[in-house]
Amino acid sequence: MRRVRTILAVAITCAGWPATAHAVETVKFSASLTPEHLDRGTTIGFGLGIGATTGLPSPLTSVDVSYPEHLGIALSGIGIRTCQPRALEVFGPLSCPADSRMGFGRATALVPFGPEVVREQASIGVVRGPTREGHLTLLFYAVGEDPVSTQLILPGTLDEARPPYGGEIIVGVPLVPTLPEAPNASLVSLKSTIGPLHLTYFEEVNHRVVPYRPAGILLPQRCPRGGFPFAARLGFEDGSDVAAHTTVPCPRAAIKRRRHP
Amino acid sequence: MHSKRGARTAVFLVAAWVVGVAMLLAGSAGAAGPRAHAAHTLKGTVTGHLHLLKSSGSELIEEGPASGPLSGHIKARLNVGATFSGTFTLYTAHGTISGSGKAVPHGEGIYESFSGTSTINHGSGRYAHVHGHGGLFGTFDRKTYGVVLQTTGTLTY
């Protein structure tokens, strides 16, 4: 039986100072690589827990997640087809080719309804969108059912990043209005994967369509000293932004090899 | 009259001396210094059909035959991230030509096209003084990692 090792990085909370002095947003950021075998395919997972020192956090407007250098996202074999944003908006995720799917996730938002605050859960699908101005795009499709039926598309692009990061995923988060005069909904948690975990693709072999699992995001042959670094920067409606960092430790085998080459 | 002729003779002698010294200097410089390098210019498109040798994370090492005004064998080290970048060396019968390039992807399927710029910065053999720049184009097979690489532009060597 194949042993799948998931390493959940230690979450680091980092608070930024918003433009207004009364509330400060806080972020817990975690990242994982599943499985974590060097020179093999993996799935990146990241999680964000958003809070505030007082009351509800300001609604989220952007999320930038930077991933480590030398991770072969473009070589992962995922997202080899594209889904058009218009088709996704009108017909939903089932209109997207299976080979455009790149990951899954869940999100929780707090929706103010008068004096009450209701918790809204949403599932997230990640599909590849069309390449725009030389940038690979990702579309995060969120579907909330209860208590409010909501469908949201969060457009994301893959961009370059400075070392020790190899790139960053920049996601715009649209504001979700609630009741008139009431504040917009606040996202308080977001978990998503990018990689082949739970994905099945199809290819034609000898005139037959056969399922297969894509290779995944290739990890380099060597683990960077100190582990694989991830960073997140979140922008909020009140103008503040918060940065958080975390590291996925190197696999034990890589640490042993480094000590006893 | 006599003094006029003497002055003419003196001017002639000085002029002859200057020309002689200049010729001598030119001759000695030619004998002792390096031979003048005649620059050649080559325009055109070189196409390489590369296949994967090995990969590590986002880095691919590929090689394959090259054809065009310069033919031979290309080896390339490519980093396929948010953008494509890499270095390459073309091995020809008369020497090597090395450079680097950067490109952005355009495609939307298994075959991803890319375009950008390349710079030729060093070489060996006949191409020891090579330099140049131009366009970098190609397609990338996201399943097999095979690359068709085209460099266009002007080389001086």
Image: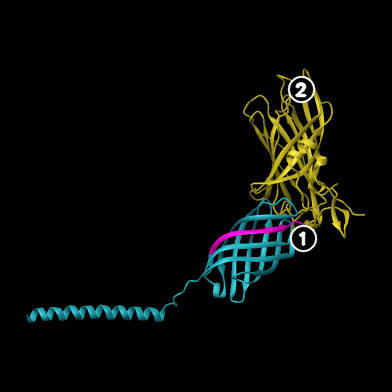
Chain colours: A yellow, B cyan
Classify A8 as above or below A76.
Answer: above
The residue type indicated by label 2 comes to Pro
Question: Residue at the location (82% across, 49% down)?
Answer: A196
Residue range corresponding to the magenta coloring? B132-144
Horizontally, residue A67 falls left or right of residue B125, namely: right
Classify A238 as above or below A80.
Answer: above
Horizontally, residue A23 falls left or right of residue B144, namely: left
Q: Which residue is label 1 attached to?
A: B144
Horizontally, residue B133 falls left or right of residue A71, namely: left
The residue type indicated by label 1 comes to Thr
Q: Quadrant of residue A91?
A: top right
Secondary structure under badge 2?
strand
Q: Nearer the viewer, residue A119 or A134?
A: A134
Distance Cα–Cα, label 1 vs label 2: 50 Å
Question: Residue at the location (50% across, 71% down)?
Answer: B40
Q: Residue B115 in the image: x percent, y percent?
A: 63, 55
Q: Residue B41 in the image: x percent, y percent?
A: 51, 69
Whether residue A9 can be seen here: no
Q: Quadrant of residue A63?
A: top right
